[in-house]
Image (cartoon, rainbow, N blue to C red):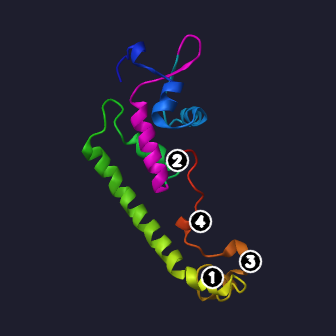
């Protein structure tokens, strides 16, 4: 990217207001290399306006369930010297489509098995169609740590907004 007029740079409070991300999230995303910032002579952060697109991308990716490492890899494929085109977004969204299809399948399986789960009251993991289909946990030695919820359903919710 070429030099940017200092008057075109955004303060952290402007980025917070316009993006909806907390200042702490912006500082963290900068520290892990997801968003670039420059510093004034007094050490205050300044952001190019393009950071708003990167933050929108991060929010969309987190909503799909991507980890920060996966987001960093996806961002590395976007051009820094120009605004991403429709073709850029299409290439990345094709990969996200598969992930969303997996999540939908996992949630559908969870939803469809919920009646049997509620019916057994989780008193017998041997009979639980959601947590222990076909008593698969018995072969692993049992215990709550071995429950078989689909991996995409067990994920931690995205951090930040």
Q: State whether residue 1 is above or below residue 33.
A: above
Q: State whether residue 151 is above or below residue 19.
A: below
Mark 4 element type: helix
Spatial separation of the CA atoms under disc 2 and disc 3: 31 Å
Would you say residue 76 sits in the magenta stretch? no
Q: Quadrant of residue 156?
A: bottom right
Number of the label disc, if any, that sits on residue 118: 1
Location of residue 103 in the rendering, given as x and y in whole percent from the top left corner: 46, 66
Location of residue 2 in the rendering, given as x and y in whole percent from the top left corner: 34, 20
Spatial separation of the CA atoms under disc 4 and disc 1: 18 Å
Mark 2 element type: helix
What residue is shown at x 52% (from left), y 35% (from top)? Answer: 33
Spatial separation of the CA atoms under disc 4 and disc 2: 18 Å
Q: Nearer the viewer, mark 4 or mark 3?
A: 4
Is 95 in front, or is 64?
64
What residue is shown at x 27% (from left), y 40% (from top)? Answer: 85
Q: State whether residue 47 is above or below residue 65.
A: above
Mark 1 element type: helix
What residue is shown at x 43% (from left), y 48% (from top)? Answer: 60
Q: State whether residue 150 is above or below residue 53.
A: below
**Residue receiving disc 3:** 143
**Residue receiving disc 2:** 69
Q: Earlier in the sequence, mark 1 or mark 3?
A: 1
Is residue 56 toward the left or the right of residue 137 in the image?
left
**Residue receiving disc 4:** 154
Q: Are marks 4 and 2 in contact (CB under 8 Å)?
A: no
| Magenta stretch in the rendered image | 40-65
Is 8 in front, or is 68?
8
Q: Residues within 10 Å of mark 3 (few under 14, many from 20)?
A: few
């Amino acid at each position: 990217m070429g030099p940017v007029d200092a008057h075109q740079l955004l303060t952290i409070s402007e980025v917070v207001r316009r993006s909806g991300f907390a200042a702490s999230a912006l500082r963290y995303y900068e520290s892990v290399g997801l968003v670039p910032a420059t510093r004034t002579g007094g050490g205050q952060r300044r952001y190019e306006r393009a950071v708003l697109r990167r933050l929108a991308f991060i929010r969309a990716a987190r909503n799909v369930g991507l980890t920060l490492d996966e987001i960093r890899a996806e961002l590395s494929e976007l051009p820094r010297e120009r605004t991403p085109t429709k073709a850029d977004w299409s290439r990345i969204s094709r990969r996200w489509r598969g992930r969303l299809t997996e999540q939908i399948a996992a949630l559908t399986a969870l939803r469809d098995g919920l009646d049997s789960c509620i019916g057994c009251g989780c008193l017998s993991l041997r009979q639980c169609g959601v947590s222990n289909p076909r008593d698969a946990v018995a072969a692993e030695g049992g215990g709550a740590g071995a429950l078989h919820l689909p991996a995409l359903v067990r994920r931690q919710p995205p951090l930040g907004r």
